């Protein structure tokens, strides 16, 4: 069994929760199943292979909070690595590589960015030459991390601004969408007005559990009214997921077919066919399936799950050939694979579907940020950029489905009981994340739109404090940031 060890300094800077979130990944960025522990102030990671790999671990950085960082590729060795030093090395390598790549593509870099990069390199150099004294080296490494992430934020903002400017110069206003999931309850008049002022797109969930609570007895009342409302206000409408592979979204009676794949597929196809036939011509895109890479809701193999999704995509494309069909993937960094093996990492799953020539015309990436377990751990903007570029290699349009918390305390209406670091999130922190990351997402030419997947905290929802309206139905600052961004997208440069 392979093992890597990392000396943690300062002592106590990593919690048991952070240890459990750490994992090792190879050059393909797919994590190995990993056992983690903290022994004598060393982070210890064990796996079944001994290949070189990158450590991914949440780490506190002054001015940036707790961020998921990665080292460079490291080989196994008897003596432990110094964790702060290796994290600084990894951040600087990614920063300098991305800077070089974007400069070759024509990015103009300000003296402020260059100064921050130089500061980070200088502090890292001091960390390297003083590594015989762990305390001193770690302080320098901490400074390098802080300056490096400062530079990463500035660089990503420069890229987004200049990419937007180039696209406007070439074609006027940006043809991108900003919207939200309407949820399974109808909007009140006040929320509806603010929705229309803020967004140009909407996701209408068609929940199988609610629509067909008893077999062959379908009720479309809520989705009928939502789609009619969207069409009357000229919103771009994405419908689905028709097959959300989560236990709370599947009808209870479906468990009767767990051991009979063909009967299960017959039930799935009957519902998909009914939904497409009902709303064909009334929606602008179909989300065929969601969370296809993370579910354990159905007692079927991964091969059968792939077959189920592929046949569903093909059916929708056949029934409504003029409307795009996409599949949604949860946790695109696949952190969950460090705790359970999978034959199909999310990008691999999507690649198989794309190559099958079944009519798949887009992918959606679901990012529920900061939640553990079941969400995507916070990362810096260059890491988001890199992940989007990797998915862009599929050659398909991309939509983002996102939620970000506005608080860290107990949320009685949240279905998922997850942990959030104390003091980590607030309404203002949620707004700042939107202002920093969403422009970067929409600057990518392959990204067609961003949808907020939890609209209201005042009704039952999945993740704590992830809505754009709080429990008192008041708009949060993040909603105003998204509305401002949407208006900015519509305005061509003078």
Image (cartoon, grey):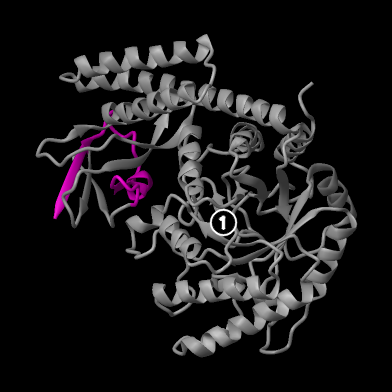
Q: Residue at x 18, y 54 (%)?
A: 49
Residue found at x 79% / y 47%:
200
Residue 122 in the image: state x and y as whole percent.
33, 12
Residue 33 coordinates in the image, percent (x, y): 28, 57
Which residue does the numbered mark 1 point to in the structure image?
Answer: 363
In the rendered image, residue 25 lying in the magenta stretch gets the answer yes
Above or below — where is 57 with respect to 92?
A: below
Q: Is 94 above or below relative to 221?
A: above
Left/right of residue 156 with respect to residue 138 in the rendered view: right
Secondary structure under badge 1? strand
Residue 470 seen in the current view = no
> Count the marks: how many?
1
In the displayed structure image, the side of residue 136 where residue 304 appears, left or right: right
Farthest-out residue, left: 78
Query: Would you say 185 lies left or right of 61 here?
Result: right
Q: Quadrant of residue 172?
A: top right
Q: Nearer the viewer, residue 464 or 318?
A: 318
Spot occupied by residue 301 in the image (x, y as percentages of width and height): 39, 76
Q: Is residue 323 magenta?
A: no
> Which sits in the foreground, 179 or 61?
179
**Image height of 415 relative to 157, above or below:** below
Q: Which residues are magenta?
A: 1-30
The quarter of the rendered structure image containing the N terminus is bottom left
* 10 Å crowding of disc 1: few (<14), some (14-19), many (20+): many
- Tell me if 287 is positioned left or right of 35 in this view: right
Residue 44, picture quadrant:
top left
Quadrant where the C terminus sits is top right
Asked whether 364 or 39 is in front, the reply is: 364
- Asked whether residue 296 is in view, the answer is yes
Give the percent coordinates (x, y) of residue 229.
87, 61
């Amino acid at each position: 069994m392979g093992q890597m060890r990392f000396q943690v300094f300062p002592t106590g800077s990593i919690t048991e929760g952070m240890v459990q979130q750490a994992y090792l990944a190879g050059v393909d960025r797919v994590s190995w199943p990993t056992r983690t522990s903290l022994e004598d102030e060393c982070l210890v990671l064990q796996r079944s292979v001994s290949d070189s790999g990158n450590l991914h671990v949440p780490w506190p950085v002054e001015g940036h909070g707790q961020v998921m960082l990665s080292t460079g590729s490291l080989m196994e060795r008897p003596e432990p690595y110094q964790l702060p030093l290796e994290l600084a090395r990894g951040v600087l390598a990614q920063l300098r590589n991305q800077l070089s790549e974007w400069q070759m593509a024509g990015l103009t870099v300000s003296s402020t960015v260059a100064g921050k990069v130089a500061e980070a390199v200088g502090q890292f150099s001091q960390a390297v030459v003083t590594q015989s004294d762990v305390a001193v080296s770690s302080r320098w490494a901490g400074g390098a991390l802080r300056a490096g992430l400062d530079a990463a934020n500035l660089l990503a903002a420069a890229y987004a601004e200049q990419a937007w400017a180039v696209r406007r110069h070439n074609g006027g206003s940006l043809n991108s969408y900003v919207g939200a999931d309407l949820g399974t309850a109808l909007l009140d008049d006040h929320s509806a007005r603010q929705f229309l002022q803020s967004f140009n797109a909407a996701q209408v969930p068609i929940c199988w559990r609610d629509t067909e609570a008893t077999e062959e007895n379908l009720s479309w009342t809520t989705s009928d009214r939502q789609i009619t409302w969207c069409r009357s206000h000229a919103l771009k409408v994405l419908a689905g997921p028709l097959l959300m592979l989560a236990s709370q979204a599947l009808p209870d009676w479906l468990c009767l077919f767990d051991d009979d794949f063909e009967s299960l597929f017959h039930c799935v196809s009957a519902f998909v066919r009914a939904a497409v036939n009902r709303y064909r011509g009334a929606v602008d895109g179909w989300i065929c399936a969601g969370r296809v890479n993370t579910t354990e809701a159905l007692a079927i193999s991964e091969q059968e799950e792939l077959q189920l999704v592929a046949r569903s995509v093909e059916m929708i494309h056949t029934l409504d050939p003029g409307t795009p069909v996409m599949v949604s993937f949860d946790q695109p960094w696949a952190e969950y694979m460090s705790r359970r093996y999978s034959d199909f990492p999310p990008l691999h799953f999507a690649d198989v579907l794309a190559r099958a020539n079944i009519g798949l015309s887009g992918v959606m990436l679901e990012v529920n940020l900061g939640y553990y377990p079941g969400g995507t751990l916070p990362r810096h903007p260059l890491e988001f950029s890199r992940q989007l570029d990797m998915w862009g290699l599929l050659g398909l349009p991309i939509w983002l489905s996102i939620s970000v918390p506005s608080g860290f305390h107990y949320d009685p209406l949240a279905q998922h009981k997850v942990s959030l670091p104390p003091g980590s999130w607030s309404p203002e922190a949620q707004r700042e994340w939107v202002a920093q990351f969403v422009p970067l997402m929409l600057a990518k030419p392959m990204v067609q739109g961003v949808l907020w997947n939890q609209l209201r905290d005042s009704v039952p929802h999945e993740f704590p404090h992830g809505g754009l309206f709080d429990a008192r139905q008041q708009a949060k600052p993040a909603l105003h940031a998204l509305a401002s961004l949407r208006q900015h997208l519509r305005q061509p440069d003078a």
